[in-house]
Image: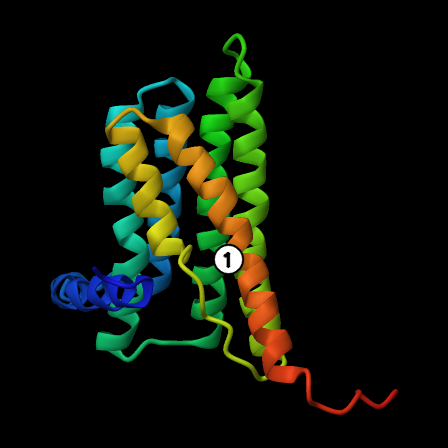
Amino acid sequence: MWRPSEISARTHRLAEPVARLVAKTGVTPNALTILGFLLIIGVAWVLSQGYFLLGGFLMVIASSFDFIDGALARVTGRSTRFGALLDSSLDRYSEAVLLFGLLWFYAWQPATQQEVLLIFATIVGSLLVSYVRARAEGLGLDAEVGIMRRTVRILILALGLVINQVPIILWILAILTNLTAVQRLFYVWRRTRKEPPLKPE
């Protein structure tokens, strides 16, 4: 059984050969990042219309741009701090847009309050997973722990769409994303609990 970190590592390794081919076209990593985000908006529209099977497959294709752009930056030597910020920012927007597409669909269906609440909880949990890690890194700590990394969240959501088990997948995402955020908080607390208090500036 692969751990989440192994899934991410394998995905990035698979992206490098594709990135080398894309590099020959002259496309920049930032342009690829933006293109991937625009495709995600299209996928969100597909989901909002209730075409879950198609949306699941398209989600995997559109999300692959997220792995290829980083690999493209590495193989072409074009990694920049702004590029990294743009990539991570659009990653957050992409996930929120996909979930909003589902939210739009369920908001117009009868008796789907449960799904709407689960999507809201998933959005909150996903944002907190990323925020806690980013805040911890700002404090000089690595908090990349927990099962619900972005790669895993996208794969689970796509699977739920393809097999038409969206409510079950939403329960899994809503619970595990928030548990992962709490796990990261607890991890940082354990790492810092013996540190002396910060002195006021």
Q: Residue at x 52, y 16 (%)?
A: 112
Pick the quarter of the image with the C terminus. Answer: bottom right
**Are there few (<14), some (14-19), or many (20+) residues within 10 Å of tag 1?**
many
Nearest the camera: 107 or 62?
A: 107
Q: Residue at x 50, y 11 (%)?
A: 109
Residue at point 34% right, 55% down?
151
Q: Quadrant of residue 144?
A: bottom left
Q: Is residue 114 above or below residue 127?
A: above
Residue 74 rendering spot, x and y as whole percentages: 27, 76
Location of residue 6 in the rendering, given as x and y in whole percent from the top left corner:
26, 67
- For residue 41, above or below residue 78: above
Q: Where does the image place residue 102, in percent across and percent down from the top left?
A: 45, 27
Query: In the rendered image, which residue does mark 1 sit on?
Result: 180
Determine whether 71 is above or below 140 in the image: above
Q: Quadrant of the rendered structure where residue 163 is?
A: top left
Left or right relative to 12: residue 79: right
Quadrant occupied by the N terminus? bottom left
The residue furthest right is 200
Q: Is residue 172 in sight in this rendering?
A: yes
Front one among 53 and 48? 53
Describe the element under mark 1 as helix, strand or loop.
Answer: helix
* Residue 28 visible from this viewpoint: no
In the image, is 110 to the left or to the right of 66?
Answer: right
Front position in the image: 115 or 39: 115
Residue that sits furthest to the top in the current view: 110
